[in-house]
Amino acid sequence: MKLLRPAKISVIESEPGSLVLLTNLLHLFSSEIELSPTVYHSDIAEELIINHPDLVLIDSKIDDKLSQQICMGVRASESDRHVGIVFVGADENGSSKSLVEFLELGADDFIRSNCSEREFLARINAIIRLKMMTDDLRRANHKLKVLSLTDELTGLANMRAFNQHFLVALKKCREGEDSISVIMMDLDRFKSVNDSYNHLVGSSVIAQTGRIIQRILGTFGENMTSYVAARYGGDEFVIFLSGLAEEQTRDLAENIRLEIQEYHFPELNPDHKITTSIGVLWTPPLYQGSGDRLLKLADQNLYRSKKKGRNRVTFDCLGDLVNFEHVSGTHGTDGNPSGDDDKIA
């Protein structure tokens, strides 16, 4: 008989040596078991979080308060992996706590210390099997969550994810914690790429642009509280930056523009350069307006970049804005992004 898989097991004793027989028994079942140092002190929960065991065997004689602390600490530290918790002690009637109480604490099972070796192994294997299935399910759910928040083509966030994070950053700005900036950008005359080559090439250009944006953001990342770049639609992108200074925001946008202008897209002819027009709106802390207004103002700056000849950054601070409501035509904010050839002479 053997365990289903190698396992890392932590043993928590009420006093030194109280579970030594079971510890020896585990070694007999498998030479691949990794037993972390036996602990019987008050810092158990913190040590378990550091060690990340697959299974925790707990002496049922430890007091109720410590039992609860251990179980709550282990369960709170779980993310995409399950940790099995098994109490071991006298039979149910001889224990100070009933089986139900152990389960209510968060345990997966209670094993009598006088059970047979076969039963002990079967119960441990059952917990390991539960762990494996639970871990697989959690990983699958995490992957689905990531996919539901990611633009498949570029690897950037989709608008659902962008809006979730943008609202959090906007709240911090309103409370005076951070500045917030919005960058709206799209590729100039992108329709010519699809017309001259094909839509697969166009998709590849958009995907590579997404990677350029993510790389530039990474170089500024340590200066920001948070940031998210998303594909707004078509060849248009939106970014918010939280906590970045005014001049740094301007530099970041300019770096993105230059990087795209100088990048050689392998699928395109060497003389076919891709450029981008960018609109930026920087807002100091304590802004009390709506997120939609910031997006609209950044989009108006993008429109100004197009109107002034494309391949440029138009930057504004909230306090320096003029009214662009008179500008005719619509752009990304009306849900019809990336149509600049039809809108700019």
Image: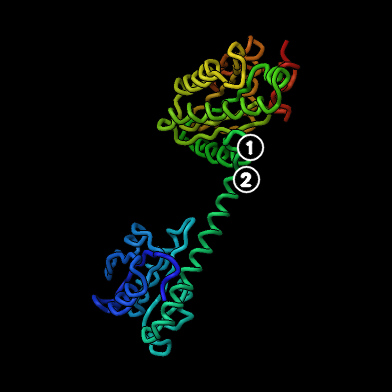
Residue position marked by numbered label 1 in the rendering:
159
For the residue pair 243 and 321, the one nearer the viewer reads as: 243
Q: Residue at x 36, y 74 (%)?
A: 29
For the residue pair 8 and 112, the one nearer the viewer reads as: 8
Where residue 72 appears, x then y in whole percent? 42, 65
In the picture provided, is 40 more to the left or to the right than 301? left
Residue at the farthest bottom position: 93
Q: Residue at x 33, y 75 (%)?
A: 28
Q: Nearer the viewer, mark 2 or mark 1?
A: 2
In the picture provided, is 67 more to the left or to the right than 230? left
Residue at the farthest front position: 1
Query: Which label is found at residue 148?
Result: 2
Q: Residues within 10 Å of mark 2 (few under 14, many from 20)?
A: some
Q: Residue at x 35, y 71 (%)?
A: 66
Q: Secondary structure at mark 2?
A: helix
Q: Compared to 300, does 127 lie above or below?
A: below
Disc 2 to disc 1, C-alpha distance: 10 Å
> Mark 1: which amino acid?
Met
Q: Is residue 325 visible?
A: no
